[in-house]
Each structure stands twice: as C-alpha cells, then as structure tokens.
Amino acid sequence: MLTFFERGRPSLALLLSGILMAGGLISCAEPPEETPISDVRFLCYVAETENGVSASHAVTAQFGTETGLNIRSLNFVCEPAHKKHSRNQLPAKHPNWWALTCYYVGGDERNINVELTDQFHPENAIRTVVKEPVYLCDPVRSKVINGRRQPGDKFPFPTLIYKVTQQVHPNPPAVFTLDEFGVQGVTPTRLAFLMEPAVKNAIENPPDEKPWTCYLVNQNPLNKVVEFTDQFSDATFEVKILQTYMLCDPAVKTILDENGTENDSEGEDES
C-alpha cells in the first residue's frame, strides 16, 4: 500500500515536463488546422534583414526555365492566409504552412498573353501580358517569433513572381485576412504580379497547382521581428516585417496566342 507521501508525490516525468515547459522548451500551442494548398492565399509584407545572400539558380515555372537567376536581396515575406469578405467569416486558426521569403531576381521578359480569373474577377476575365520574373519566393524551413518556434509545415514548393502589365479594372472590395500575425483589413488596389508554382535546379515539371494573382494593398504597419531559416541560410537570421504589401489570390490562368486565342489553362476557380 502506498504511503500518504508516496501517493501525493509527483512523478519524475511530470516534474521534468513542468521544468521544460517553464523554460519554453515545450510548446503548449496546438498546431494550426491543415489547409489545402488550393485554399491558401498569401498576404505579403515588406521586409528587411541584414542577412546577405549570394546565390544563382535555374528556376522552372509554366512559362519556361529561367537560367542563372541571381538571388540578391530579401524584399518581402509572404504569409499563408485565409481571406474573407467579413471578419466574422474568418476561421479560428491561420493556415498551417510556414511563410515564403521572397528575394529580388533579374530575369528576361517573357511577353506572354494570358487571361486570368480569380475571386475578385470570377466572370470578367483580366487579359494581361506576363513580363519578366522579379522575385523568387523560397519556403522557410523554420520560423521563430518571440523566442518560440512556431508550429506549422514547410510550404512544399518555391514560387516565381512575374510582373504583369497594368490593366484598368474596378478595384476589388476590401477584405479581411488571417495569418500568423493576426487579422488584417486590406484593400486591394491593382493587379501587379502573377505568382507561379516553380521548381529550382530540376528537370521535372513545376507543381501542378494553380497560380496566384497578386494585388497591391494599403500599407498597414506591423513592425514585427521574426527569425527564419531557408535554403539560402542554414543559420537563423532576423527579419523585420514592416508593413502589408500585396495580397495573392488563387487564380485560373489561360495562356493565349498572339491572336488572343486560348492555348492552355491552369488552375480552377475558388470561392
């Protein structure tokens, strides 16, 4: 029979668990709910870091392979986000994916005619011209905020962001987003970029996933410091997240020939 002292004595495992939790070595936070890639939006933030990068990669997207892209400087960070037209419609948790760190690259102009539909333009397709690639976005491998590693998963592929020609269309309505940093109210202004699934230094085809149309948004200040590791830096480096920059929405893309005739399409419409 156990004595009173033995019955009331906490187990060694319980004591050890309490010590680790107090020291921040065990996280009590539950991982975010899983979100399919097809449902992920990106809210991108202007960012700055003192961490230098010097690398060159061949990157393949649906528009072809860009050889010798020089990765220069970190320009912004794209956080996977939920997007709704009402704040009350947002789910309780943000997407489970970690962010993309986006670096400036200099690529050649493509001049490819495309037709795009997304949630902002579900019926009246936008016709535009895809220009040169300007940013390579790399999935981060770890993410630390306020000294604690955040739960989540590495995004499964990089993306290549292309400039598109400006088009005159009614501005999309204001929306609410939810990401790692909380809820943001943003107002898209104009379509500026097309984000394409990609592969780096590989012969295989890019991932069979829909692209994203990226709209510039109003600049909401954030001023958060985050620590990342990615393919360009195995060591943890600090990034200061400054303000909102653009919102990227899943899209349907149709490639047109010179006469404006449909050639190929990618993606499917999402509400």
Image (cartoon, grey):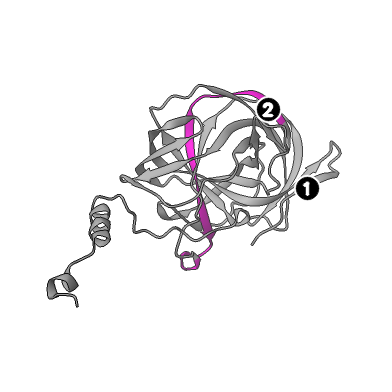
Instruction: Tell me the residue at 52%/57% (across/down).
Output: 82
Q: Is residue 74 above or below residue 214?
A: above
The amino acid marked with disc number 2 is Glu
Q: Is residue 85 above or below residue 260?
A: below
Q: Which residues are magenta?
A: 65-89
Along the line of sight, the residue nearer the viewer: 220 or 11: 11
Q: Is residue 27 above or below residue 102?
A: below
At which x and y percent is residue 211?
Answer: 66, 46
Badge 1: residue crowd in 10 Å (few <14, some 14–19, many ≥20): some
Q: Residue furthest bottom?
A: 1
Q: Answer whether residue 84 is magenta in the image.
A: yes
Using the rendered view, name the quadrant where residue 66 is placed. Answer: top right
At which x and y percent is residue 186?
Answer: 48, 52
Magenta-highlighted stretch: main secondary structure? strand
What residue is pinned by disc 1?
Answer: 265
| Mark closer to the observer (2, 1) | 2
Are the residues tagged 2 and 1 within 8 Å (C-beta)?
Answer: no
Q: Quadrant of the C terminus?
A: bottom right
Along the line of sight, the residue nearer the viewer: 217 or 55: 55
Residue 222 in view:
no
What residue is pinned by disc 2?
Answer: 66
Mark 2 / mark 1, whichever is N-terminal: 2
Instruction: Tell me the residue at 17%/67% (across/down).
Output: 9
Instruction: Tell me the residue at 61%/26% (across/down).
Output: 57
Between the residue at mark 2 and the residue at mark 1, the CA separation in whole angstroms equals 21 Å
Left or right of 260, for residue 136:
left
Q: Quadrant of the N terminus?
A: bottom left
The amino acid marked with disc number 1 is Ser
Along the line of sight, the residue nearer the viewer: 147 or 43: 147
